[in-house]
C-alpha cells in the first residue's frame, strides 16, 4: 500500500511520498493527490520524495505534472535526497525546470523568503 500524505500549513502544503520507489504502481496515486490538492486551492506545494530511491518514467511524469499544476499560480518545490534520483533528474534535464532542494526545511525557507520579497515589493 502506498503511503502518500499531505500536511497543510498556512503558506504551503507538503506532499510526502513515503515510498522507496516512485514507479508505475505509485505515480498515478501521486498524480491523483496532486489534482485533488490543486482543486482544494493549494498554491504552494513541496513534493517530498526524499525517501524515494528509484524513479521510473511514470514517476518523472508525476514530477512534471506537479510542476505544471502548481508553478503557474504559486510554487512547486521538490525535496530530493538520494543520489540516484538526483542523477536521473539531471540526465532527463529536468533540473533546469524543477526547483530541487536537499531538505524540507530548505524548501520551506525558500517559500518564506519569497513571501518576504513579495511583501517588501509591496512596501516600495
Image (cartoon, rainbow, N blue to C red):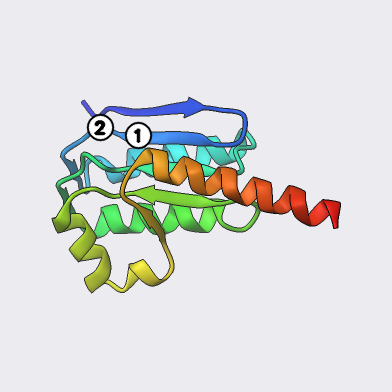
Residue 12, above or below 59: above
Residue 117 falls left or right of residue 78: right
**Image coords of residue 44 (percent x, y):** 56, 44
Residue closest to the eye, 90 or 28: 90
How far apart marks 1 and 2 lie (CA) works out to 6 Å
Where residue 59 appears, as percent x and y from the top left, is 27, 52
Secondary structure at badge 2 equals loop
**Which quadrant is the N terminus positioned in?**
top left
Does residue 50 lie above or below 87 as drawn?
A: above
* Residue 79 placement, left or right of 75: left
Relative placement, left or right, of 39 versus 103 is: right
Total marks placed: 2
Give the residue at x 26% y 64%. Answer: 89
Q: Are marks 1 and 2 in contact (CB under 8 Å)?
A: yes
In-image side of 34 versus 58 (left or right): right
The residue where tag 2 is placed is: 18
Task: State the residue position of label 1.
Answer: 16
| Image quadrant assignment for residue 38 | top right
Residue 40's disc is none
SS type, badge 1 = strand
Amino acid at each position: 500500500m502506498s503511503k502518500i500524505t499531505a500536511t497543510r500549513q498556512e503558506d504551503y502544503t507538503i506532499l510526502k511520498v513515503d515510498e522507496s520507489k516512485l514507479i508505475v504502481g505509485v505515480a498515478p496515486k501521486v498524480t491523483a493527490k496532486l489534482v485533488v490538492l490543486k482543486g482544494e486551492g493549494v498554491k504552494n506545494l513541496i513534493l517530498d520524495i526524499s525517501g524515494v530511491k528509484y524513479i521510473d518514467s511514470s514517476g518523472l511524469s508525476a514530477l512534471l505534472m506537479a510542476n505544471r499544476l502548481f508553478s503557474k499560480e504559486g510554487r512547486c518545490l521538490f525535496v530530493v535526497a538520494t543520489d540516484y534520483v538526483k542523477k536521473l533528474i539531471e540526465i532527463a534535464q529536468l533540473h533546469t525546470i524543477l526547483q530541487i532542494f536537499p531538505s524540507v526545511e530548505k524548501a520551506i525557507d525558500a517559500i518564506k523568503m519569497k513571501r518576504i520579497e513579495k511583501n517588501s515589493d509591496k512596501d516600495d
